[in-house]
């Protein structure tokens, strides 16, 4: 009865039975064959140590939109304020002291895009609700105003620092951009990323108060980029322009001792030697600072001014014709010979000379090598070297509509500098143009097709003009400084002055037609092409 009252098969067991062991098929080991010993590494303790897993890549931020209930706008304001604080927070992890500016590190790249993705997710979630969409836009004004205030406050101390305006020179070379400049450029990059989000979402484009009200916020980000990039590029311009203008002075600096085994040495202008050291640093800094489309106008102005100054300097340069030769070093044995009639220094009779002195001296196996010749680089050679250096600089974008014209102007200026060495070489060798005046003028027209007329004019006058016809300013009756300030200040001004200057120069050259036939004929063809293009 007791068995039937409390049967054991009606009660659950005190604990579940252990599962049967799973049989894992063993893998054949190459070292466990017949008669083969087990490898010693099978019993190594390293097989029982748990390996540290490799860190997983950081996933891209995926901002889930908030639930649109009664407290949605309040929660959204808190979320935006928190996102702005995180965007300006210092990067996690220890940092060396030499990477900090006033105890702060540069803003990491991509934080502006992360903040923008949060805004885009909330706006896209409320796209079907125009009233909520407008309310979200109004809620963006306060956190962005706080953000602009913080960024402007940080820039005040940075822009006032002398380190921000420092550029490397030959006497003072340093990492470029330096820490202060890197921090300022990180703020500009952060603003650029937010402007990119504004462009994608179409925010801040309407100045109407009934719009999204973010026009002032957008202008604030634009102002931050300009406040950083423009003085940064201006500092580089102030260092480059004097070096470019110095190319007008001919090179006459010899070298002290040439390398062994060289037959000829080409000595470039000191400005070219300096630019060969500094230009890689400037090119890298310009590439870093001009990633925004807003900075391409400033970049184009820098490039055009450098190219124009280079063409003016090289077109007015008069090279030294003789190429000096390095004098051989004097031997101290030759200087120690006594002159005839010099009084003896002692009364002791001379010693008997050694027998080897009376042996016949054979000539050496080969004659001594002549001393290497120093060849100063001509204006054409310096122009080619300068063009190769300037090509490494970044250019404005040709894909964006607002910078397409600037890119075309920069390309035309580069093309003029590229073709200038050909004209300089041709006029230096006179290229056998004295046979036929019409043929010579036609060749000059082809060589100057991409060069401004007022740049080619002094080169052609110096090569084919008569006596007293080498200065354009003298023909105009003004000083050289007035001529350059009034007519050679830039590409556009030179183009405006081309026709009246060419007519005045032709009138002066008509007094001696026989000596200036090629120049007069070239000017006539140049004026005809100018009138046809207009």
Image (cartoon, rainbow, N blue to C red):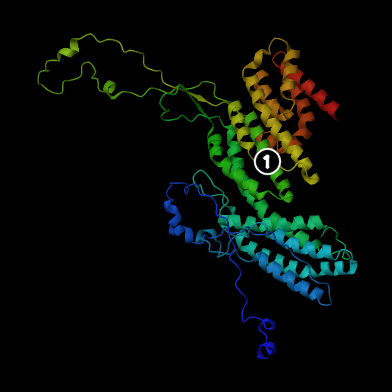
Q: What residue occupies the far front of the structure in this picture?
A: 1
Crowd rating for badge 1 (residues with CA inside 10 Å; few <14, some 14–19, many 20+): many
Image height of 316 relative to 85, above or below: above
Does dot 1 land on a helix, a strand or a loop? helix
Looking at the picture, how far across and down is residue 133, in whole percent?
86, 66
Residue 71 visible at all: yes
Image height of 407 relative to 225, above or below: above
- Image quarter where the N terminus lies is bottom right
* Foreground of the two, 331 or 513: 331
Q: Residue at x 36, y 24 (%)?
A: 329
* Foreground of the two, 129 or 454: 129
Looking at the picture, how far across and down is residue 513, in whole percent?
73, 15
Count of marks placed on residues: 1
Q: Residue at x 61, y 79 (%)?
A: 15
Give the image quarter of residue 80: bottom right
Please indicate whether residue 258 sits to the left or right of residue 518 in the image: left
Q: Residue at x 62, y 20 (%)?
A: 428
* Foreground of the two, 168 or 123: 123
Residue 469 visible at all: no
Q: Residue at x 76, y 26 (%)?
A: 502
Looking at the picture, how far across and down is residue 464, in whole percent?
67, 18
Residue at which label 1 appears: 303
Looking at the picture, how far across and down is residue 78, in whole percent?
74, 73
Image height of 471 relative to 402, above or below: above
- Image quarter where the C terminus lies is top right
Give the image quarter of residue 332: top left
């Amino acid at each position: 009865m007791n068995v039937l009252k409390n049967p054991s098969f009606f009660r659950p067991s005190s604990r579940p039975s252990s599962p049967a062991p799973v049989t894992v098929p063993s893998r054949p080991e190459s070292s466990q064959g017949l008669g083969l010993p087990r490898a010693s590494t099978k019993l190594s303790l390293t097989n029982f140590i748990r390996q540290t897993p490799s860190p997983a890549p950081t996933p891209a931020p995926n901002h889930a939109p908030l639930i649109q209930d009664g407290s949605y706008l309040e929660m959204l304001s808190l979320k935006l304020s928190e996102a702005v604080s995180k965007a300006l927070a210092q990067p996690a992890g220890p940092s060396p002291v030499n990477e900090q500016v006033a105890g702060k590190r540069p803003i990491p790249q991509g934080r502006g895009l992360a903040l923008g993705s949060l805004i885009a997710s909330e706006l896209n979630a409320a796209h079907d609700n125009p009233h909520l969409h407008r309310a979200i836009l109004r809620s963006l004004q306060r956190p962005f105003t706080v953000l602009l205030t913080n960024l402007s406050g940080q820039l005040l101390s940075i822009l006032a620092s002398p380190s921000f305006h420092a550029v490397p020179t030959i006497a003072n070379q340093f990492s470029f951009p330096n820490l202060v400049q890197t921090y300022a450029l990180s703020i500009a990059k952060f603003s650029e990323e937010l402007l990119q989000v504004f462009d994608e979402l179409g925010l801040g484009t309407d100045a109407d108060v009934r719009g999204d009200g973010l026009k002032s916020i957008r202008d604030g980000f634009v102002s931050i980029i300009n406040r950083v990039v423009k003085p940064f590029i201006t500092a580089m311009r102030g260092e480059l322009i004097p070096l470019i203008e110095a190319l007008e002075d001919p090179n006459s600096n010899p070298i002290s001792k040439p390398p062994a085994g060289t037959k000829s040495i080409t000595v470039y202008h000191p400005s070219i030697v300096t630019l060969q050291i500094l230009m890689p640093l400037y090119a890298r800094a310009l590439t870093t600072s001009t990633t925004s489309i807003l900075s391409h106008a400033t970049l184009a102005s820098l490039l055009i001014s450098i190219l124009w100054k280079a063409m003016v300097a090289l077109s007015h340069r008069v090279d030294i014709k003789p190429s000096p030769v390095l004098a051989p070093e004097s031997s101290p044995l030759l200087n120690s010979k006594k002159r005839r009639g010099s009084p003896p220094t002692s009364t002791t009779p001379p010693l008997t000379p050694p027998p080897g002195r009376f042996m016949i001296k054979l000539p050496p196996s080969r004659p001594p090598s002549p001393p290497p010749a120093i060849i100063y680089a001509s204006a054409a050679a310096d122009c080619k070297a300068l063009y190769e250096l300037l090509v490494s600089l970044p250019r404005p974008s040709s894909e964006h509509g607002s910078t397409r014209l600037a890119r075309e102007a920069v390309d035309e200026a580069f093309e003029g500098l590229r073709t200038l060495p050909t004209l300089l070489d041709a006029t230096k060798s006179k290229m056998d143009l004295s046979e036929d005046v019409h043929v010579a003028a036609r060749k000059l027209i082809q060589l100057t097709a991409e060069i401004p007329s007022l740049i080619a004019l002094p080169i052609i006058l110096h090569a084919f003009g008569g006596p007293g016809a080498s200065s354009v300013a003298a023909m105009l009756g003004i000083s050289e400084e007035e001529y350059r300030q009034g007519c050679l200040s830039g590409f556009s001004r030179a183009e405006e002055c081309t026709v009246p200057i060419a007519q005045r120069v032709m009138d002066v050259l008509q007094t001696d037609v026989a000596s200036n036939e090629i120049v007069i004929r070239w000017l006539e063809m140049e004026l005809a092409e100018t009138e046809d293009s207009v």
